Image: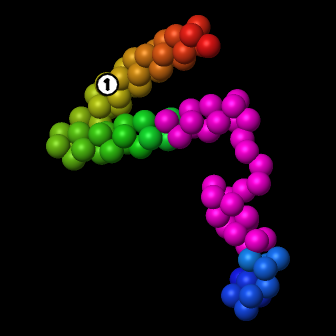
Amino acid sequence: MFNKAIKGNTTAMIFWLKNNWRDKYNDSALSPEEREMTKARKENVIQDTRIKKLKADVMERLGAESNEQLDMLMDKLIKEADKEHDAEEHTDKQTD
């Protein structure tokens, strides 16, 4: 397909772009619900990544013997972050 697109086949170009650069060349727009779900998933991935990086930093500083204490602390922080996130979602739904 790519070779046909490179050779000038317009249909192949369109097909290749729609399948490989969906965010830019997709014909169908996401519904508001899909956008919100995508946004929420993205935020969750960002927060999970941040938590994992912080956990790795702390483990590096404290050493492996403090791993159990670190897990307890991280669980507590995650629960607090989840509570804050749920409260924000509740506030957002009330304003809609």
Q: Nearer the viewer, residue 78 or 18?
A: 18
Residue at the spot of label 1: 73
The answer to whether 23 is drawn above or below residue 20 in the figure is: above
Span shown in magenta: 14-43
Residue 76, image quadrant: top left
Give the position of the C terminus as an image quadrant. Answer: top right
Report if residue 89 is visible in the image: yes
Q: Percent x, y for residue 48?
A: 44, 38
Of 92 and 58, nearer the camera is 92
Please state which of residues 5 and 89 is positioned toward the viewer in this rendering: 5
- How far across and how far down the image is residue 30, in percent? 72, 41
Placement of 70 over or under 59, stated as above or below:
above
Q: Quadrant of residue 26?
A: bottom right
Residue at 64%, 64% in the rendered image: 21
- Number of numbered discs on residues: 1
Instruction: From the top left corner, tell me how far across and down residue 17 is, in percent.
Output: 70, 69
Instruction: Say if the magenta span includes residue 34.
Output: yes
> What percent of the width, then of the height, locates residue 87?
49, 12
Looking at the rendered structure, the kind of residue marked 1 is Leu
Side of 13 relative to 95 (left or right): right
Q: Magenta stretch mostly in which secondary structure?
A: helix
